[in-house]
């Protein structure tokens, strides 16, 4: 199959390969608004955590500078039968503790990633079993034909069976229940950088892995990842030279940083769509003044919320133009995007009020809204704008804006009535959004981030057909049909595709990918 990779990603210079280590260690200092919540690569399917952890851990298949699939711990793969994929594993690879990487680690990581507490079930839920052929060869058997399986593996990271057993970390850290283990704070991957020091929500230090099997094209020996939640403080740290790279750049500070001769700003489209979700399962909302019923079960209420939101106003005043309003749950750069479904419902407060009245809420109602404040660009401000918009139609929002350290455990327990979330399709294909966000939740990973439990049997049926269909034309027609169903149901409320913005010293060269992941192995820092 050939899925078009239509996106344009930004490159800031080219990280040059270095022939040897310099006499003095090169230390790169990064400032980010948030932190990876755990070093456990199976504990949370969240972009920043994956971005940080995958400098230490690696998947079988990765993405290169051009964002196309590339070998990682697997050197080759081929579909040998409709439900069988053969993978050749890389020889001569060692985990950071010196333990050799083998097929046993892959099988162990499969069992771990599909177990209770894992947030990575979506990536391995299609697998029926993995058969070991020898230490460096496996057959992966899927439940049904699955032609894009390698694309699904780019964020399923492989852990050492031996290390996990020694450290009592055979089960994933469960963010929902607050259960921790050694894998939260220690790490033992195969990647280009080792974990040296971990101070959650303060700083994490990484050291170059000089025994890395691959090529580290940058020259950085040590990476200090600092958590600087306050936007002004983070910008000041960059301007003063206390940090070399910052992410994200507050939209209001982009031009100011650009004007500094010693700094650069790198902007590009991100594959992430920011959206709102609503509890559509409970008979009564958890946090609302409406007793005995759930307003969100009524499509008219969901549509009223949609049409009450002034998305162009949010783009103009909150995002300062750094967003693109969107009507679908994934951006145009992702395979399956249907241009004819790209028109949003109109912003219309009178239509919203009428829909609420027809549904039995002429005076609106009260409901809480969960939002992170350290994950997206201006996420808290977006939520405040949504709350202000809804107030105009009589809906009173009780905002619960919090760090993702408390936000994620809450929403992943589905302890939420109304929430803001963002999603980046790791496969660059619509199926990722369908199975993770829109399908009816089950214990196999389907609908794992469908936190409001939206459900449509026809959409579920189409999702199963889409994942097995090999004819691109038929497949895209089914994708369109599924997303039309979701749009007509107002299953979620898409808001916008956000833009990436990193800022850094002009002594730095790096690569920005459209999934917003930062690869330390591609970064070079000039000493002079």
Image (tube, grey):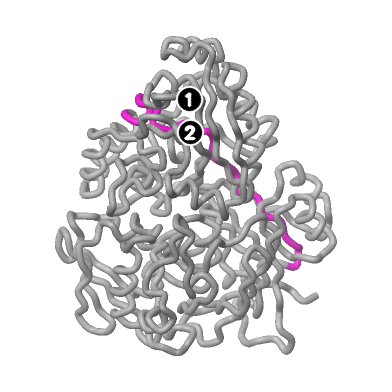
Q: Residue at x 22, y 67 (%)?
A: 140
**Distance Cα–Cα, label 1 vs label 2:** 9 Å
Say which element carries label 2.
Answer: strand
Toward which corner of the image does residue 30 lie, by quadrant? bottom right
Comparing 502 with 202, the one in front is 202
Binning the other alpha carbons within 10 Å of mark 2 as few (below 14), some (14 to 19) or many (20 upward) gives many
Dot 1 and dot 2 residues touching (CB under 8 Å): yes
| Residue 330 in the figure: left or right of residue 498 | left
Rendered location of residue 448, percent (x, y): 37, 49
Examine the rendering and report whether any part of residue 107 can be seen.
yes
Residue designated by label 2: 494
Rendered location of residue 150, percent (x, y): 32, 62
Looking at the rendered image, the disc whose residue lies closer to the viewer, 1 or 2, is: 2
Toward which corner of the image does residue 378 lie, by quadrant? top right
Say which element carries label 1.
Answer: loop
Binning the other alpha carbons within 10 Å of mark 1 as few (below 14), some (14 to 19) or many (20 upward) gives some
Per the image, is 504 magenta? Answer: yes
Q: Which mark is residue 344?
A: 1
Rendered location of residue 133, percent (x, y): 19, 80
Can you say whether 84 is above or below 192 in the image?
above
Q: Earlier in the sequence, mark 1 or mark 2?
A: 1
Can you say whether 20 is above or below 202 in the image?
below
Q: Residue at x 63, y 45 (%)?
A: 377
Comparing 428 with 385, the one in front is 385
| Residue 194 in the figure: left or right of residue 41 | right
Magenta segment range?
485-507
Can you say whether 163 is above or below 251 in the image?
below
């Amino acid at each position: 199959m050939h899925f078009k990779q239509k996106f344009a990603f930004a490159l800031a210079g080219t990280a040059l390969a270095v022939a040897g280590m310099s006499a003095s260690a090169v230390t790169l200092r990064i400032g980010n608004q948030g932190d990876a919540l755990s070093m456990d690569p199976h504990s949370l399917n969240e972009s920043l955590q994956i971005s940080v952890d995958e400098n230490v851990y690696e998947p079988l298949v990765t993405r290169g500078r051009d964002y196309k699939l590339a070998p990682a711990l697997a050197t080759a793969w081929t579909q040998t039968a409709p439900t069988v994929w053969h993978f050749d594993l890389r020889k001569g690879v060692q985990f950071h503790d010196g333990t050799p990487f083998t097929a046993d680690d892959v099988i162990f990581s499969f069992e771990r990633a599909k177990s209770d507490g894992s947030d990575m079930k979506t990536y391995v839920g299609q697998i029926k079993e993995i058969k070991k052929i020898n230490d460096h060869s496996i057959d992966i058997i899927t439940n049904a034909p699955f032609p894009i399986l390698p694309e699904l593996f780019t964020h399923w990271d492989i852990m050492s069976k031996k290390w996990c057993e020694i450290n009592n970390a055979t089960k994933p850290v469960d963010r929902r229940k607050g259960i921790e283990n050694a894998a939260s704070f220690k790490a033992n991957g195969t990647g280009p950088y080792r974990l040296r020091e971990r101070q959650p929500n303060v700083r994490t230090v990484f050291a170059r892995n000089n025994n890395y099997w691959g090529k580290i094209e940058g020259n950085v020996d040590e990476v200090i990842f600092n958590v600087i939640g306050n936007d002004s403080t983070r910008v000041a740290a960059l301007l003063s030279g206390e940090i070399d790279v910052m992410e994200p750049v507050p939209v209001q500070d982009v031009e100011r940083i650009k004007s500094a001769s010693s700094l650069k700003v790198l902007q590009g489209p991100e594959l992430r769509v920011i959206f709102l979700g609503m509890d559509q399962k409970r008979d009564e909302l958890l946090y609302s003044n409406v007793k005995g019923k759930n307003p969100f079960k009524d499509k008219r209420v969901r549509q009223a919320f949609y049409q009450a939101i002034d998305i162009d106003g949010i783009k103009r005043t909150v995002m300062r133009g750094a967003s693109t309003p969107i009507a679908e749950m994934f951006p145009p750069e992702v395979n399956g995007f249907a241009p004819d479904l790209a028109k949003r419902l109109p912003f219309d407060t009178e239509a919203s009020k009428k829909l609420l009245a027809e549904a039995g809420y002429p005076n609106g109602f009260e409901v809480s809204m969960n939002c992170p404040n350290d994950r997206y660009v201006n996420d808290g401000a977006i939520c405040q704008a949504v709350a202000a918009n809804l107030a105009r139609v009589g809906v009173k929002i009780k905002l619960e804006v919090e760090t993702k350290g408390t936000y994620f455990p809450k929403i992943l327990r589905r302890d939420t009535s109304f929430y803001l979330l963002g999603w980046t399709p790791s496969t660059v294909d619509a199926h990722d959004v369908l199975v993770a966000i829109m399908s009816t939740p089950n214990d196999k990973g389907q609908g794992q981030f469908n936190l409001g439990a939206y459900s449509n049997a026809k959409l579920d049926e189409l999702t199963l057909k889409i994942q097995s269909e090999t004819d691109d034309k038929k497949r895209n027609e089914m994708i369109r049909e599924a997303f039309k169903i979701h749009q007509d149901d107002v299953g979620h409320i898409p808001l916008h595709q956000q833009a990436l913005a990193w800022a850094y010293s002009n002594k730095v060269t790096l690569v920005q990918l459209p999934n917003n992941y930062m690869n330390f192995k591609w970064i070079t820092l000039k000493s002079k």
